[in-house]
Image: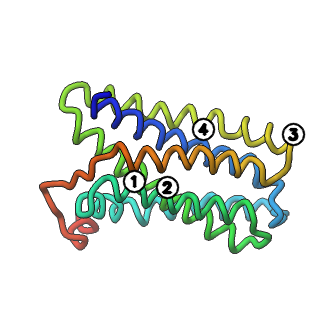
Amino acid sequence: MKPITKVMIVVTLALFTDGLLYGLIISLLPYSPAKLSEDWMYEILSASYALGVIITTPISGFFSDRLGRRYSMILGVVIQAMAILIFANTTHFSCLLIAKLAQGIAASTTWTSGLALITDHFTEKRAQMLGYAVLGNTIGLVIGPLLGGFLFEKFNFQFPFIVAGCFMSVDIFLRAKWVENIRSNVLVSLRDLYSL
């Protein structure tokens, strides 16, 4: 298989998994053992995800350029796995906040490194390839809530997270095996990132 085909599979799967987990968690939050009893709890959880993305996206790009795409992408799925473990097992709202923040951090790391990986490999048809990868996320966002609800009704609250773990196992394997550790030739300081 060509290296560029592997890149497209890895990045599309990574964004699919990100969307799948986001949608799966949204559908399961009302049934969480943490007992979300007020609307403001859902609002705060959504805001903590967004805060994780906002704070870490520039830093994710910085580390992706410095450390390389592979390590950044692996870091993203490891953080996502920690968030999933918390979601599946916590009985405390404060832990859900931490998990949602971690999910946002994982998303920013995966998206930034994954899309950079595509731009590293494609000079022609770059926008088309980016579109295919983003389509993976959209498909995950559609399937996630449906899968989460179905598995919850047929089994229990933890089972959808076990299935999510299976997706993440394949995802991390492919990120580790198929992604070259490309670093950027142009390095910007962390201070300059926030002064743009």
Q: CA distance from mark 1 to mark 4?
A: 20 Å
Against 75, residue 153 (above or below) is: above
Disc number for residue 73: 1
Q: Given the image, on which type of amino acid does mark 3 rest? A: Lys
What residue is disc 2 on?
77
Q: Residues within 10 Å of mark 1 (few under 14, many from 20)?
A: many
Q: CA distance from mark 2 to mark 1?
A: 7 Å
Against 77, residue 99 (above or below) is: below
Query: Which label's residue is closer to the chain start, 3 or 2?
Result: 2
**Horizontal placement of 104 versus 158: left or right?**
left
Question: Tags 1 and 3 in contact by the CB under 8 Å rule?
Answer: no
Disc number for residue 141: 4
Q: Residues within 10 Å of mark 2 (few under 14, many from 20)?
A: many
Against 78, residue 122 (above or below) is: above
Question: Tags 2 and 1 in contact by the CB under 8 Å rule?
Answer: yes
Disc number for residue 34: none
Q: Given the image, on which type of amino acid does mark 4 rest? A: Leu
> Residue at coordinates 68% horizontally, 72% vertically from top-left?
95
Query: Which label's residue is closer to the chain start, 4 or 3?
Result: 4
What residue is disc 3 on?
154
